[in-house]
Image: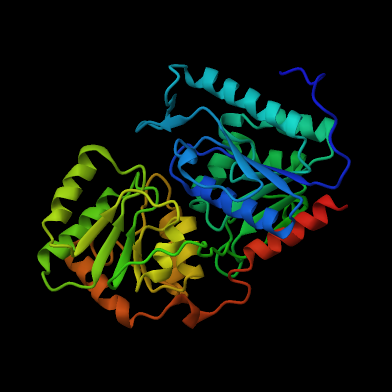
Amino acid sequence: MINKLNTPARNTTPQPRVLFYSHDTFGLGHLRRSRALAGAMTKADANMSAIILTGSPVAGRFTFPEHVDHIRLPGVTKMTDGSYVSQALGLDIDETTALRAGLIQAAAEHFEPDLLVVDKEPCGFRGELLPTLEYLKKHANTKLVLGLRDVLDSPDVLAEEWERKGAVQACENFYDEIWVYGLKAIYDPTKGLDLPQSVRDIMHWTGYLKREVGDEPLTIPEPYILITPGGGGDGEAMVDLVLSAYEQDPDLSPMALLVYGPFLSGDTRAEFEARAQKLNGRVQTVGFESKIEQLYAGAQGVICMGGYNTFCEVLSFDKPAVIVPRTVPRREQYIRAERAEELGLIRMIDEERDGMTPAAMIKAIRGLPEQNPPSAHHHNGLLDGLDYVCGRVDALIRT
C-alpha cells in the first residue's frame, strides 16, 4: 500500500467527501447511477466533493458534474462461459482483482471519505472491496452505505449468488445503511434473501433517481421516437427488430432516432448502418450520446430495453414507452418490465406472449401515440430518490 507519511493533513473546514464504488464489468448502468447520485449530492452541498471508482471502459467519454471526478480501475470482461478476463493488461483475473483492490484501498486511504457508497455488490467484484471495508471500519470514521437498484435478479438466483459471495454477512458486518433506489410497493429486490432483522432495519426505500435535462438543449427538426438499447452490448436483437419493422412497413412513422450505445459496434453495427441508410431518413442513427437525457425530453415516445437507468429516464421525462427486456444472463429487466406493465407505467414486448417479431414491433410503435405516459398511474414518492438520498447523506455525515 502507498505510504501516507507525506500526505497532507485533511483540512478542518467542513468539506464533506464521498467515495463511490462502481465495479462496472458490463454496460453503463453502475457508472451512470453513481454519476447521478454524485451530481445530486454535490449540488445540494457546494462544499462537497466526490470521486467515483469505476471499471467502465468508457468513463472518459462522460462529462462529470462540478466537484465530481473519477478514477478508472483496470477493466475486466465477462466471457460467454461466465469467467472473467482482464480487458487490456494481459494479467490473469486474480492478478487483475488484486491490482484493483490495491487501487481502491489507496484511494480510500488518501481521499479519507466521510461516506462510501457501494453500488450493488456488497463485497465488490470478486471480493475486491473487502480489504477497504475492513480498513475503513477499523481506522476511519467513514459511513458505509450499500445502494441497490429496484430489481437485482430472480429471487432464487439472487439467494444462491449472495450465499456464495458472503453478501449477507458483509451487510451485517460493514454497512450502516442500505438504500434501495425504488419503491417497495413496486418491487422488493431482496425478495428471497434470508436477511436478518438487523439488516432489514437499516434499509431505506428512496424512490427512483430522477434525471434532468442539461443546459445545452439538442434540437431535432422533426418528430421522432427514441430507440435506445442502453449501453448497446446486449441490444442487437432489439435494434434488429426496430429496423425490420421500418423495412417491412413503409408507412411506419414518426422517424426513429436510434442511439446504438458505445458497446454495439464492429461488423454488427456496420450492418445496421447499411440497413438504416436504405430507409430514406426514416431511421437516423447516433453512435453514443453522453447527454441522452436531452433526447428523451424531445421524444414522442421510447422503444428501449429495461435497464434501471433507462427506466428512470422514461419515468423522469414521462414518456410513453415500450420495453423489450433481456432475459439473460439475468432476469432483472424482465421482472422490472413485467411489474411496470402491471402498474400501467409502460408496455412491454414479451417474447412468449407477443413474439419477438417485426409485426409485434410495428404494433408497439404504432400504439405509442395513444399510450398513456407513466404519470397517468401516479405513485407517491416515485421519483424522490435523489432528494431522499441527499437527506440521508446529511443525516449520516453530520452525526
The image quadrant that residue 361 belongs to is bottom left
Q: Give the residue at x 75% y 29%.
A: 109
Report whether residue 278 is seen. Answer: yes
**Which quarter of the figure is the N terminus placed in?**
top right
User: Total number of numbered labels?
Assistant: 0
Q: What is the basis of the colouring in this image? A: rainbow
Determine whether, in the image, residue 188 is placed left or right of residue 243: right
The image quadrant that residue 383 belongs to is bottom right
Q: Nearer the viewer, residue 298 or 81?
A: 298
Determine whether, in the image, residue 113 is placed left or right of residue 327: right
Q: Position of residue 244 (x, y in %)?
A: 16, 59
The image quadrant that residue 345 belongs to is bottom left
Q: Give the residue at x 34% y 46%.
A: 234
Determine whether, in the image, residue 132 is placed left or right of residue 5: left
Q: Position of residue 146 (x, y in %)?
A: 67, 47
Q: Give the residue at x 51% y 61%.
A: 214
Determine whether, in the image, residue 186 is placed left or right of residue 268: right
Report whether residue 238 is seen. Answer: no
Q: Is residue 371 above or below residue 21?
A: below
Q: Is residue 311 above or below residue 79?
A: below
Q: Position of residue 390 (x, y in %)?
A: 72, 59
Q: Position of residue 297 (x, y in %)?
A: 43, 69
